[in-house]
Image (cartoon, helix red, strand yellow):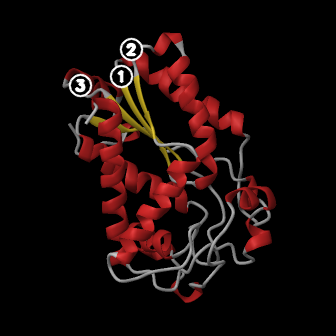
Amino acid sequence: MKDTVLLEELSWPEVQEALVAGVRTVVIVVASIEQHGPHLPTMTDTAIGYAVGERVARKLGQALLAPVIRPGCSDHHLAFPGSLSIPRETLIETVLAYVRSLAPHGFRRFVLFSSHGGNFDALEEAARRLWDEPTLKDVRIAAYAGRAALLDMMQVMNAAAESLGVRQDADALHAELTETSVMMVRYPALVARDRLEQGRMGRIDADELFQRGLKALTPNGILGDARAATPEIGAAVLERLSDHLTAFARRELDGG
């Protein structure tokens, strides 16, 4: 077989061969197409979703990464040109359709997470419906979703930067040093290094953010400070975050 865990890079006979070989796990990531400050492309969350999702699939073993879902729930970014958003119910139904499509083929374990903050609540509802669906009773779902998971993910990302001596006083992260650093690893040519800026710092109420939108809180679209970003921090973020999500998936799917 090809040296890939991306489902979209495989032919149907190769997917069948993977199933015969014992692959039963699919990682599903929901992402976005939205503004990421003056220095990052709108596909940043999608790129991060692929980078982290691929690592999680490889670390789990016997797993594939489904095509990353985008756009996502990004209404709070729509004041910035180029941002796309879909209704919450559309995202939920898309996640359900992924699982309903793949489960009959023989996949039995699904790991769900988001690389975009606006999707966490919708993903939690999608997981709830999957758990309750009678036709999927023999399918296991590990969903890293909901507001607590979003806060946890941002803490993990910040901690990765702090492990290299770089700290930013921000508890909501968007287009700042961690995401910018990951993009320096993944797509360095798409990072406008001459436009790295500081955005809104300090404490931010999540409900206010989603209700008022980012433009009301941060005119440049950044939450945190992008100026200290480096590829080294990006590598640390990818490693720590993929380790964190892999450990979560194993606990949920295997009980350890």
Q: Which mark is residue 108?
A: 1
Which structural element holds mark 2?
loop
- Alpha carbon distance from label 2 to label 1: 7 Å
The quadrant in which the N terminus is found is top left
> Does residue 209 sit above or below 104 in this rendering?
below
Describe the element under mark 3 as helix, strand or loop.
Answer: helix
Residue 100, above or below 150: above
Quadrant in the rendering for residue 175? bottom right
Residue 128 position in % (x across, y down): 56, 27
The residue positioned 48% from the left and 26% from the top of the image is 99
Q: Which of 167/10 is in front?
A: 167
Q: Residue at 35% across / 34% down in the picture?
A: 252
Q: In front: mark 2 or mark 3? A: 2
* Disc 1, SS: loop
Q: Residue at x 70, y 78 (%)?
A: 220
Where residue 160 appears, x then y in whole percent?
36, 69
- The amino acid sitting under disc 2 is Asp
Rendered image quadrant of residue 242:
bottom left
Q: CA distance from mark 1 to mark 3?
A: 16 Å
Quick check: marks 2 and 3 in contact, CB under 8 Å?
Answer: no
Query: Residue 17 shows which numbered tag?
Result: 3
Circle 1 packing at 10 Å, graded few (<14), some (14-19), many (20+), is: some
Give the crowd class for mark 3: few <14, some 14-19, many >=20 residues within 10 Å: few
Q: Is residue 4 visible?
A: no
Q: Amino acid at mark 3?
A: Glu
Q: Position of residue 80 (x, y in %)?
A: 76, 67
- Is residue 133 among the parts visible in the rendering? yes
At 59% from the left and 85% from the top, the residue drawn is 195
